[in-house]
Image (cartoon, grey):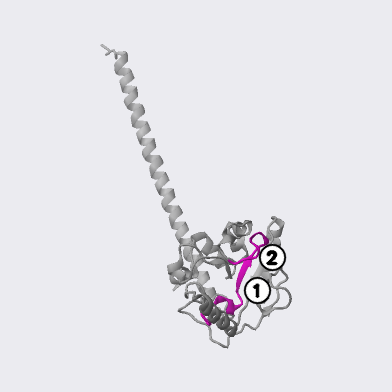
Amino acid sequence: MKRKWSMPVVIYSLFIIVCVICAGTKFYSNYEYDKQQSVMAMKNEEIEKKELTNMNRLVNNDDCRMYELINKSNKLEKSYIPGDLVYPSVNTVIKGKDNRNLLRRNAAEALEEMFAAAKKDGVILYLHSGFRSYDTQNLIYASAKKQSGESDEYIAKPGESEHQTGLAADLSSKEVNFKLDDSFEKSKAYKWLGNNAYKYGFILRYPKNKESITGYKYESWHYRFIGKDIAKYLHKNNLTMEEFYKKID
């Protein structure tokens, strides 16, 4: 005699079967997701290793001193003057053929490209200060110390200034009356640079909340040319040059 199944038993059995199927599907989905995440993490790690290897090669074969880290621990010699200084064809705060408008050729060309791109977006940038010799920085440092007693977190000693490399540029705009102070942070120019400077090989050299790492107070106007590859990596990972050099050391 065939056993008859009551409707509640059938429904309960179906419910159990559905639950088992759902649990199995969820387990499989979670397993696949975790597997994909693990594979993605491994791929990202491989990509980063490759990036760091390539950038390490750039730094170690830096015969032209383009990637040189300059700070209080890594100084330039007094006699150092780059041999490829040129005047970029950009807006400048200081008019004429002033030495402070000079930059190294690769930095100058990148600056021209960046200024042109900013202009297309309705942002007019100005070069406030580029190259400074050791002697010029010495005069600026001595004057600042005498007049206001500013600490070494605000102004670099001669030999410790990136401006001597010819790769650093202080940038400003008309909307802040060309001043080099914290007002620049609130400008359209600053916002544009934050989103785009790295595309042209420039980084904000002394960012906010990194003072203990760079040794200098936040400077919203000070940009350093480091080349597109390294600039992109630093921007993506929110790194200073000091932190970057530790990673490739």
Q: Quarter-wise, where is residue 182 in the image? A: bottom right
Instruction: Return the x and y of residue 77 as percentages of the image width and height.
Output: 53, 86
Instruction: Return the x and y of residue 97 as percentages of the image width and height.
Output: 72, 78
Q: Is residue 104 visible?
A: no
Dot 1, how many residues are within 10 Å of its Cα: few (below 14), some (14-19), or many (20+)?
A: some
Instruction: Return the x and y of residue 18 as percentages of the image width and height.
Output: 36, 27
Direction from residue 20 to residue 246 in the image, left or right: right
The residue labelled by disc 2 is: 113
Q: Nearer the viewer, residue 210 or 147?
A: 147
**Which range of residues does the magenta coloring cover?**
157-180
Direction from residue 87 to residue 146 in the image, left or right: left
Q: Residue at x 48, y 71 (%)?
A: 216
Instruction: Return the x and y of residue 210 as percentages of the image width and height.
Output: 46, 65
Direction from residue 241 to residue 85 in the image, left or right: right
The residue labelled by disc 1 is: 106
**Kind of residue indicated by mark 1:** Asn
In which quadrant of the rendered image does the C terminus lie?
bottom left
Q: Give the vertical position of 10 relative to 70 (above or below).
A: above
Q: Residue at x 39, y 42 (%)?
A: 30
Label 2, secondary structure: give it. Answer: helix
Q: Is residue 178 magenta?
A: yes
Q: Give the vertical position of 23 relative to 88 (above or below).
A: above
